Every structure is written in structure tokens, then in C-alpha cells.
Image: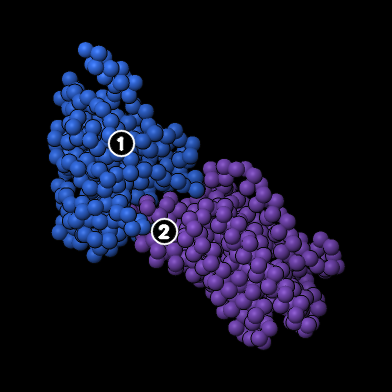
Amino acid sequence: MLRLEGIYFSYDRTDILKDISFEVKKGEFLGIIGPNGSGKTTLLKTIARILNPYRGNIFFEGVDIKKIPYLEYAKKVAYLPSQIDIPFSYTVEEFVSLGRFPYIGRYGEIKKTDREIIDKTLEQFEISQYRERKIWELSDGERQRVFISQVVAQQSSVIILDEPTSHLDIGHSFKILDIIREINKNGTTVITVLHELNLASEYCSRLILLSQGSVFSEGTVEDVITYQNIEEVYKTKVLVYKNPHTGRPYVFGIPSTLLTASLSEFKGK
Amino acid sequence: MKIKYTGVFIFLVLSVIAGLSLGSEFYSIPRLFSLSAVDKNILFNIRVPRVIAAFIIGAGLSVTGAVLQAILRNLLAESYTLGISGGASLGIAIGVILGKTSLLPYLAFLGALLSLSIVLLASIKKHLSNPTVILLGVALNFLFSSLVLFIIAVAKNEQFQSTMLRLIGDISYFSYGILYAGIITISILSLILILSGRVYDVISIGDEKAISIGINIEKEKRYALFICCIIAGICVSLGGIIGFVGLVIPHITRSLFGPVHKRALTINFITGGSFLILADTLARTIIRPLELPVGVITGFFGGIFFLFILLRGRYKEMW
């Protein structure tokens, strides 16, 4: 569906992305993980056409995305930045309906089908009761659901999410990822950056681990989340076990105090 | 909502009536319907054009203010605080000195474009925060206003001087040619902006979101800024620098009617126009028989309002 071929990107001389190539298949739930500054967000932005790589190409179903008009591309790929600042207090409904722009256009009116899609999305995210509320009045978790529902209302074949669960508690995080999984099951391809490795492990069907702007490891969750990979890329000691209920790998971090304690204990023996 | 719309309509009607009947000569409503020849002359040759000019200037400034706030995502943006009006006034001063009176609106437009380009280029290159962009605009305004005052002082020609003194914001004299052209141009351009309202909704939620929703952001911004400069140029050609209208009216409109631009820009056109008619009426009645420049009135109320927004601190979340 999406194919990246040798992508390079730099803001000023230093390369943020170096020779990145991979393919995204239809219906995948692809997770992109990696430490801070490894280029995750930049990578998403090049796929969303917000940033232009200085070398390499991105193809959507075989077509170079640079050749696709913006409005058409918006029907294929939707993007949720990690942070959205809105100077004006739109209501939930007004905000979510902006996601229908690619279909309504500059001068058109919101049609009945658009309404139905907006209603359905609001219900899916359990925010219909807030439709008249201003987005500033909502809690962080509710607001994040509003932001994602706008992306979903855009009805693109691929949705790109940059840390959809940042700043959210465990309850809201699981709720949001559950809904995204449901959307994914209905046929939408999902590409998401997730900071929390264990969430990535539970929800993604495939992972890409970035390190210093390059792909370090790529494959199934079990292939990528190993203690060797995580320790090398994140420069910290971890333990990786299996979640007894889901069978997915689970990463435990180890505080350095404990590490030196056990090390000296080891030396004592 | 219906009550609010009716309110806007009543505001328009009342301000037009006030604009026509108040002034150095008072016309009660019954008198407006039984006019002598002299009265007719005063009313149709002086008051009516002035009310129309005030309306179109106020409408233009408010619509551009609202659009600038949306595309720059800056609640303090308007043609005055961004230095656009100052640039336009410099263009006019140069035109007057060169004796090119027929070119005034074009020179005003060029001046507006020049100062907006300076502000935007600097803000992009230096990654300036929103309040800093406004500081830059205000500084440019001062710079251009000083240049205008310098030109006035050097001109030593009374006619030039009186023409240029009106640049401080005065609707007591304007050329009919510019008025007619201004009514048509500002109305059409405002209509274009209103019809594109949904684009400004999308742009207001951020560049990254706007691109991914299908907006060609660079093109749309350039297009909107260009239109705003034309409107601001005409407004300054007609009435000089009238500050804060483009700040106060869009804020009040948003707080009453919400931020969705198709609706908000339409309301801005009407309330902005009505507001400036009222401000101008106040300006010519408050120290009767003398007249104040309308810029004094809008500057006074707008300045208080501007401070109020600034001091609220979290002005981002205000409306």
C-alpha cells in the first residue's frame, strides 16, 4: 500500500532520517518505536507529506505521493500530530466535521452522508454527548478522543498517529487503542508511533524500531522487542517477559540503583 | 441563535440611524422624512457617503482581522497590530508627495504588502512567538508612522499636510472615486473570504493538520494575505490608520457566534461596519461642533480591550 524507498531527511545538514526503506501492507497495525530523537515523528511527517525528504521516494499504491494533489492525498492518508493547539474554541462537532473537508471542499455544504459519518464516529468514540461542548472544556482523555475521531471521520485508507496515548492514563490509553484496533479490524491501515513499548507490543501487528534515524530492527513484535534490541537502542538494562494472558513480550525497566546493588552482590560472590 | 442574529440586524439599523441623524446638525427621525433642500444637501452629500465609508472600512478591517487571526493562529493579529496599516499609510504619504493621487490605493497596497512581508519573513526566519510577532508589527507601525510624520513636516505644503494628517484615522474627507471602487472591491473580496471560510477553519487548527486534511497551505495563506493587503490598503486610503477595529470586533463576534468562519466572517462584516459608523458618529458629536478623528475613538476603546486580552494571560483559551 505504502512504500518508502531510501528516505533521507535533514533540517539543517545533520540527517534526521537516513536511508529508510520499508513497506506498509494493507490492513496492518504498524508500530514505530525508538528512543527520543530517533526520528519517529519526522518519519511520520514525511509519510503525511508535511516534510519533504531530500532524497528517496514514497509511493502510495505505486504512485509517487508528490504527484498526488493534496485533497486527493487527504482521502488516502490522515495524520494526527502529537500535539494540537487550537486558538479558537470550536465545539466537538464543528471540530470533527473539519475531517470531512476533503469530501466537502472549499465551497460545498455538509451533506447527509457526512452527517451520518460524523455521528457514527462520535458514537464510536463515546463523545456524542459532548457534541455541543467546546473542546477546551473537555478533559485530556476526552479531547484526545475528539482529535482521533476527526482523523477517523476523514475516512482515509491509512491513518497515521503520533503518540495517540501521550499524557493519558492507563485507562484512557487502552480505551483509545481499543477503538483504533476496531477501526483497524474494519480495514483501515494504522501507522502509529507509540512511546510506551508495552502498549506497542500489545496492539501492533508489526513493529519498526528506529535508532538514530535508521531502521534498527523490523518485524513481528517478538522479533523486535527482545532485551538485546531494547538494551542496545535505548542504552538501558531491561528484562523482557511474556504477558501471561496475551503472550506478547513485556518490557520491565531496571532502576540503576538496583543494577549496581545486584552487580556488587554478584562481585561479592 | 435567532435572537443573536436579530440583535446584529438591530445594531446595524440603529447605527445607521445614529450615523445619519447625529452630528453638528441633529436630524430627528421625523425630520429625516421631511427634509428641506439644504438638509438634503447635507444629508446626501456629506452624511450618507460618510456613513457608507465608515461601514465599508469597518467591515473590511474586521473581516481581514478575523482572517489574519485564523491563518496566523494569533489572536492579537489585525492589520493595525501587524504593521500593515502603517505600511499602507507610508505608501499614501509617498504618493501624495509625488502628486500621484490617482495611484494612492495601489501605493497603499504596496506599502501594506511590504510591511506584512517584513513581519512574516522575520517571524518565519527567527521562529518568533505570537506576541513577539505583534511586537514586531507594532514597532514597524511606529517606524512607518514616524516616517509619515517626517514627510508631513518636510512637505511644507498645507494641502499635503492636511491630506496626510488624515492618515491618523479620519473619515471626514475622502475621494468619491476611491469610495465607489472601495465599496465594490471590499465587498467582493470579503465575499470571497467568507465563501472560503471552511479553509480558514481548517488552517486555524494548525499547519500540520491543515496539510493532512488536504489544504495547500502555502498557496492558501499567500492568497488570503494578498486579499487582506488589498482590503487594508483601501481602508487606509479611505480613512487612514484606524486601529483595533479588526481586533475587537472579531473577538466579540467569536465569543457570541462561535469561531466557524463562514458564519463569523459574515457577522464580522456587518458588526464591524456598524461599529465604525457608531465610532465615527461619536467622534463627530462628542466635542461638537468640533470633530475628533475616528482613530481616537477606536484607539481608546480598542486599546483598553487589547490590554485586557494581553493581561488575561491565557488569552489562547479565552474564547
The image position of residue A94, as x and y in percent, is: 42, 47
Asked whether disc 1 touches disc 2, contact meaning CB atoms under 8 Å apart, the reply is no
The amino acid pointed to by label 1 is His
Residue denoted by label 2: B199
Residue denoted by label 1: A195
The image position of residue A102, as x and y in percent, is: 31, 56
- Foreground residue among A18 and B221: A18
Q: Image check: B186 left or right of A175?
A: right
Q: Work out which residue is located at the far front of the displayed protein and give it.
A: A268
- Identify the colour of chain A in the image: blue
- Same chain under badges 1 and 2? The reply is no
For the colour purple, the matching chain is: B
Residue B296 makes an appearance in the image: yes
Parent chain of label 1:
A
- Foreground residue among A168 and B204: A168
Dot 2: element: helix
- Foreground residue among B94 and B69: B94
Dot 1: element: loop
For the point 45% across and 43% down, which residue is it? A91
Q: Image check: A235 left or right of B208?
A: left
Q: Work out which residue is located at the far right of the displayed protein and give it.
A: B289
The amino acid pointed to by label 2 is Val
Parent chain of label 2:
B
On screen, A70 above or below A208?
below
Residue at mark 1 to residue at mark 2: CA–CA distance: 33 Å
For the point 49% across and 45% down, which residue is it? A89
On screen, B153 above or below A255?
below
Q: Image check: B298 left or right of A151?
A: right
Find residue A266 and report its image quarter.
top left
On screen, A60 above or below B150?
above
Q: How is the image coloured?
A: by chain
